[in-house]
Image (cartoon, rainbow, N blue to C red):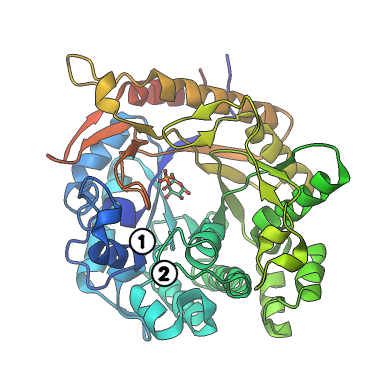
Amino acid sequence: MVTFPTNFVWGAATSGPQTEGNFHKQHQNVFDYWFATEPDQFDQGVGPDTASNFYNDYEQDLALMAQAGIQGLRTSIQWTRLIDDFETASLNRDGVAFYNRVIDAMLAHHITPYINLHHFDLPVELYDKYHGWESKHVVELFVKFAEQCFKLFGDRVDHWFTFNEPKVVVDGQYLYGWHYPQVIDGPKAVQVAYNMNLASAKAVARFHEICPGANKQIGIILNLTPAYAASDDPADQAAAEFAELWSNKLFLDPAVLGQFPQPLVDRLAADGVLWDATPQELAIIAANPVDYLGVNYYHPFRVQRPDISPKSLQPWMPDIYFKEYELPGRIMNVDRGWEIYPQAMTDIAQNIQENYGNIPWLISENGMGVAGEERFMDEHGVVQDDYRIDFMKEHLTALAKGIEAGSNCQGYFVWSGIDCWSWNHAYHNRYGLIRDDIHTQTKALKKSAGWFAATGRRNGF
Ligand code: BGP
């Protein structure tokens, strides 16, 4: 049997923009705007405008999650729902009432809230006016929004996160164009990374002032993916070293250790693209490490030497130092196009234990997205998702090894509780323990929900 420590939290993760729907929302975030202006690139017609209808269905959805044994729910507050005026952070009454209802309903269902403040969902207005995360003014506006959240909900919410996967904002919105506003600019992406680190540290500082108390904690959610080198060849090793700095340590080091990794700073400075930082800001980052970490893990990062020379790519892009490749013979989640490699769970656990002071952490996302799940429905309409159960078992087994070795992992949050909207793939791949029929908005437990509940009760499998 694979067992977990007492008090290990069996949870689920989701986000506001991917579940709520736009109902009564005053402002658009970048994804609302993108979907409204370019709907053709998303299939199935259902977008963040409707999503999984959580705004209307939250009571029923939370009841189903409780049945699925979900003890903690990580979701997010949408900046564009809670706030009316971004400059003053004045409150939107309907937004305040909605999040109050949701948090109270979670507590009534004995589901512990874990609240995140930013899940890729920059208000589009702040991009139009200030170029979003490129601007330090937006850092200040984010902190004002965070303060409102802490004041409004800090009495009932003990566990907070500043950002979900800020590296995906850097990559998706400012470097490779996967996400709106599709800025493709290496030096700007470097500044965005710095500004988001600064915003996180400033929010951490305000949190501790507004919500003192040993039971109150705030962290950041990072998609930590060990960079595995293609070979022992020094060129591949150097590529993996840079990839590790750029993809993981860029956020992990400032958040936990209070400083940026020096080799990365040196490299960016030598390339003439180092961020604009002041000593005062660096002191804020140094003084405000997170209390705990959320780690999202889906797939490994396989890297090899780049096939372009550093001088050939102008303007600067990080890709001059490494190239992602596909490991021959790897096992794939074909629908999502991601390699399945559970061993990384053990490696991540070990890294946090050995290099980051064994800070408390949890898996804040892990899961399997599968297309066409109707294929696996039995005669009672229950999706027989044994593949998802196997995926969770394999990853949990690898995680348990890291915990046995002493890593301070305190929970596993599956992505996701209920099928939800995805940034580039809409409802194509389904991740939920609970199915959402997006045409009727009826929700039903999948087989994996029963397995998850039983695993939580036994604290293992
Ligand atoms: C993570 C995001 C989630 C979720 C998940 C699954 O990066 O934090 O919001 O979307 O990935 O990925 P996708 O939706 O792209 O299949």
- Quadrant housing residue 187: bottom right
Residue that appears at 76% across and 55% down = 242
Q: Is residue 190 above or below residue 424?
A: below
Q: At which x and y percent is residue 239? A: 77, 50
Residue placed at 70% from the left, 57% from the top? 249
Q: Earlier in the sequence, mark 1 or mark 2?
A: 1
Q: Amino acid at mark 2?
A: Pro
Mark 1 and mark 2: span between their CA atoms?
Answer: 21 Å
Quarter occupied by residue 156: bottom left
Left or right position of 137 against 399: left
- Residue 24 vs 65, above or below: the answer is below
Outermost residue, right side: 234
Mark 2: few/some/many CA within 10 Å (<14, 14-19, 20+): some
Q: Are marks 1 and 2 in contact (CB under 8 Å)?
A: no
Indicate the secondary structure of the residue bearing disc 1.
loop
Expressed as whole percent of the image width and height from the top left, the position of residue 186 reads 61, 70
Label 2 SS: loop
Q: Quadrant of the N terminus?
A: top right
Residue name at image x 47 percent, y 62 percent: 177
Image location of residue 74, percent across then percent down: 42, 48
Q: Is residue 423 left or right of residue 99?
A: right
Evaluate whether residue 409 shows in this view: yes
Task: Identify the residue under disc 2.
Answer: 181
Q: Which residue is mark 1?
A: 77
Ligand 1 under 8 Å from disc 2 Cβ: no
Check disc 1 and give the amino acid type. Answer: Ile
Whether residue 151 sits left or right of residue 44 in the image: it is right
